[in-house]
Structure formats: structure tokens, C-alpha cells
Image (cartoon, rainbow, N blue to C red):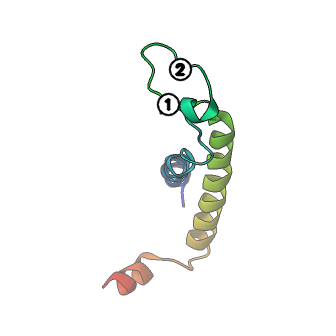
Amino acid sequence: MGIVSAFVVFAVTWFLALYCLLPVRIRSQEEAGDIVPEGSMTGAPSNPNLGIKMIGATIISAIITGIAYYLINNRIVTLETVDRLLG
């Protein structure tokens, strides 16, 4: 696996992990008891904790990229095995 392939796997898994983590532990402004400003939706997140979620997405995608790198470089998964599995 080259550096470009590793970066692509990392980028795709990072965004996928981030989108999976976004709804975790979200409380709306209404549920949190915050004052909802004029023009804001009551269902908007009170505190989305994006920094923590980005760090979590980075850790998850680094692990997945490491596993993919190991499997491809040790020839555990090759194009022939994928072709055989998918027919």
C-alpha cells in the first residue's frame, strides 16, 4: 500500500467515523434548558463537542488504516482473494 492509498483509506474512514460519532451524546437546546436565541431551532445541539468527536474519529480511522496496511502489505488480502470472494 502506497502513501496515497493509505491517505485515501484514512480520509474515507475518518469522515465515516465522524459521521457515526456526530449523534452521540447530543442534547438539544430545549432539553438542556438553554435559552433558545431568536432564529435558532430548538432542536439545535446545545454543546456538540466537535473537538472530542474529531479526536475519536482520528483514533478510529488510524486503527482501521493500520489494519488495512497490515493486511495488504503482508498479502493476506490481495486482488485475487477479493475476486474469489466477490465472484
The C terminus lies in quadrant = bottom left
Q: x%, y% of residue 34? A: 61, 24
Q: x%, y% of residue 72? A: 55, 70
Can you see residue 47? Answer: no
Mark 1 or mark 2, whichever is nearer to me:
2
Closest to the observer, 17 or 22: 22
74 is higher (above) or lower (below) than 17:
below
Residue occupying the point 63% across, 40% down? 54
Residue occupying the point 57% across, 66% down? 68
Mark 1 Cα-neighbour bin, 10 Å: few <14, some 14–19, many ≥20: some
Name the element at disc 2.
loop
The amino acid beneath tag 2 is Val
Residue 36 badge: 2
Residue 81 badge: none
Distance from Cα at disc 1 to Cα at disc 2: 9 Å
Residue occupying the point 46% across, 13% down? 38
Asked whether the beta carbons under mark 1 and mark 2 sit within 8 Å of each other, the answer is yes
Among the 4 quarters of the image, the one containing residue 64: bottom right
The amino acid beneath tag 1 is Ala
The N terminus lies in quadrant = bottom right
Among the 4 quarters of the image, the one containing residue 84: bottom left
Task: Name the residue tied to disc 1.
Answer: 44
Can you see residue 46? Answer: yes
34 is higher (above) or lower (below) than 39:
below
Mark 2 Cα-neighbour bin, 10 Å: few <14, some 14–19, many ≥20: some
Closest to the observer, 74 or 26: 26
Q: x%, y% of residue 44? A: 49, 30
Task: State which tag comes first along the sequence, 1 or 2.
Answer: 2
